[in-house]
Amino acid sequence: MNMVFLIAAGLVLTLVLERVLYISGITAYTYYLTDRRLKGFPNYKRKWQNQLFHGKITTDKARLVPAPTPHAMVSSCIYNVNKTPIFLKAIVPDGVYWSIAFHGRNQACYFTLNDIEARNQYGQEVEVVLTKSKKFYQAVGNEIVVAAPRLSRIGLILIRTIVMDPSNPDNINQVREIQKKAFIETVA
Amino acid sequence: MTIFLTIVYSLLAATGIAYLEFRYKMRPARLANYDIISNGIWTTNRRGEGSAEALRIHRARIARYTGFGMNRTEAIYWGTSVDSSGEQLDCSNIYRIDGVDPDTRWWCMTVYQDQFFIPNRFDRYSYSKTDVQRNSDDSWTIRISAKKQSGSWIPLGNATGPFHLTFRCYNPGDSMIEQSEAAQLPAIIKEETP
């Protein structure tokens, strides 16, 4: 009887432990891989964090992120809001898909705003403040205030702008002009 | 002592099973089998590449194999590694992709090998809704091959072996979001084997 009870208890314990180990392991693995990917960005260095860098059209030489989009020019920022919120300002282009996306360390995209939503709600200019908690920043105007998830106070901001035809230099120059008008700075 | 041994054996067994489950679910060949929507040869994640609601295993797979996707209202990422007859896409063949614009604001068809672009002297890796050449009925055709083709052609350069296609649909319409299984997606036809 004792042995049967022990075997049954052992099986139940094994199943419970397996679930705990699997869930915690796969979660930790996701964070580890994302951190490793973020560290591969040239702008991961502390002095370049919280600054927006404007990418060019992606070619076959690009190895930063797998499965890139050849039809988009992407501005990227490794953000770190542990010490201070950051302020993002961008101009919304006309007639082309454009979006701001905040990506957390768990691969969840926790904030997205595309050109249609932005223009309908905020007009041609959009301002977003990213902070570690909404209690650390009080909105003073029309800016959108976003709180980073607790485990994603370091993460990635991507501004994607579609290039209608990447073989047309005029299309690329138009997107470049849109990119140049976007910036990120820390909030004092 | 017996209780202690039971706990130790349980822990060892649980660690082993968890590890095997992890390895099994992370295998590339299992990519299409978790929480996915199938539409013919095309598959996509049911909850979106960048969704916070996506399964843990899916987010781990995204971190490993792609990274930083968006949710389904922004983009649906359809993928396939086979043609319409179910055969593996291979660089030695010529493929014709026939399609009409699906219910989405903008789309883009991209060729990848091992998750990156295939080098070619034209720097052409994709076609989109706005630069593909149209047929008289507004449908479109893209050809993928190493050998030069007329019209919208994605060159495979000197690559050999299998490749993968991703069909990105940005700002998909309600019908594509709610009835993804029935969305009208392109057909991939192998034209000839040189």
Image (cartoon, coloured by chain):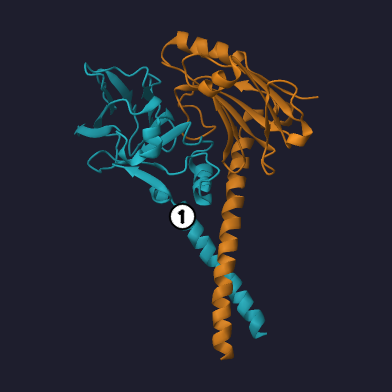
- Which residue shows up at 38% across the image and 20% down it? B121
Q: Position of residue B93 (x, y in %)?
A: 25, 33
Q: Quadrant of residue B131?
A: top left
Which of A4/B115 is in front? Answer: A4
Residue that sits furthest to the top in the current view: A170
Q: Position of residue A77 (x, y in %)?
A: 64, 27
- A46 vs B86, left or right, is right
- Which residue shows up at 53% across the image and 21% down it? A115
Q: Position of residue B53 (x, y in %)?
A: 53, 45
Residue that sits furthest to the bottom in the current view: A1
Which of B82/A118 is in front? Answer: A118
Q: Position of residue A187 (x, y in %)?
A: 77, 25
Q: What letter labels the chain drawn in orange?
A: A
Q: How many callouts does the rendering have?
A: 1
Residue A55 makes an appearance in the image: no
Judging from the image, mark 1 belongs to the subunit labelled B
What color was chain B assigned in the picture?
Answer: cyan
Residue A5 makes an appearance in the image: yes
Image position of B2 with respect to A143: above or below: below
- Which residue shows up at 60% across the image and 26% down it? A76
The C terminus of chain A appears in which quarter of the rendering? top right
Residue pointed to by mark 1: B25
